[in-house]
Amino acid sequence: MGRIAGVTAAETRERLLRAAAEVFAERGYDGTRVADIAAAAGVSNGALYAHFGSKADLIVTALRAHGPRLLADLFAADPDRSITDLLLVVGRWLPRRREACGYLIVEALVAARRDEDVARSMRDYMGERSGWLSGLVRVAQNDGDLDPALSPDALAHFCMLLAMGSALVTPDLHAVGDREWTALLSRIVGAFAPAGTPASQSGASQ
């Protein structure tokens, strides 16, 4: 198998990234061979290496392309929506079951503990995600939605820990009721509001 006739290089790359996300999520990083990904994408090993230098490069690139980006998608769809409301919407989604690609972050984080090549790329990925979240926090602080005394970097780190932890504690292992979870989130997000903000205005309606 070489490059598929009538398929562009960009389409081949996307096919490989989708296959990588699915195979890594199913078999784990250590249990996946480059040949497995190439076969799932319907291309040769050589075609894969024409786009990606290593398995480590492939897992992080697949995470960038197909990892969950719910907050970014919501913000892009409605940039005028308050950050606190967006945090609540995304927070409510966290305990729910997700598609297989939604657990790709778990495989990447585990692989980063054992493989320095993966760790190097993951540090860049995590830094980018944290920087983007910190920027949103600063916007919300300037708009008066979040307490300006909060550290944007610390709050971004908190959000990433919550999101990535939810990928580890799946509904199959432990579940929580939507009502109880939403009530807790509202209390937490309300604590991020500027001092003196009425409780009724510090979070989205349930």
Image (spheres, rainbow, N blue to C red):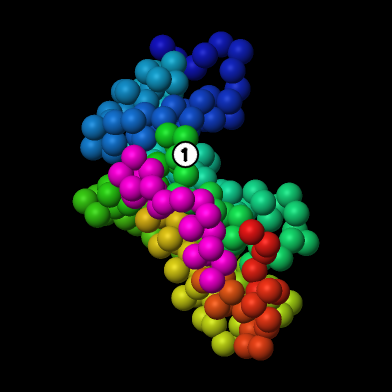
Q: Is residue 85 left or right of residue 187?
A: right
Q: Position of residue 45 (x, y in %)?
A: 36, 22
Q: Residues within 10 Å of mark 1 (few under 14, many from 20)?
A: some
On screen, 193 above or below 59?
A: below
Q: Nearer the viewer, residue 17 or 184?
A: 184
User: Image quadrant of residue 101?
Assistant: top left
- 30 lies above or below 199: above
In which image quadrant can residue 55 be found? top left
Residue at 37 percent across and 18 percent down: it is 39
Q: Which residues are magenta?
A: 166-187
What residue is at 33 percent from the left and 48 percent from the top? 174
- Quadrant holding the N terminus: top left
* Position above or below: 14 against 40: below
Which quadrant does the C terminus fall into? bottom right
Whether the magenta-drawn stretch holds residue 180 is answered as yes
> Residue type at mark 1?
Arg
Image quarter of residue 20: top left
In the picture of the structure, the residue carrying the numbered disc 1 is 98
Is residue 34 shown left or right of residue 137? left
Q: Position of residue 93 (x, y in %)?
A: 53, 49
Q: Residue at x 73, y 77 (%)?
A: 143
Q: Residue 47: where, in percent of width, then height?
A: 43, 23
Number of numbered discs present?
1
The answer to whether residue 40 of the structure is visible from this angle is yes
At a point 49% along the width and 17% down the height, the residue shown is 3
| Element marked by disc 1 | loop
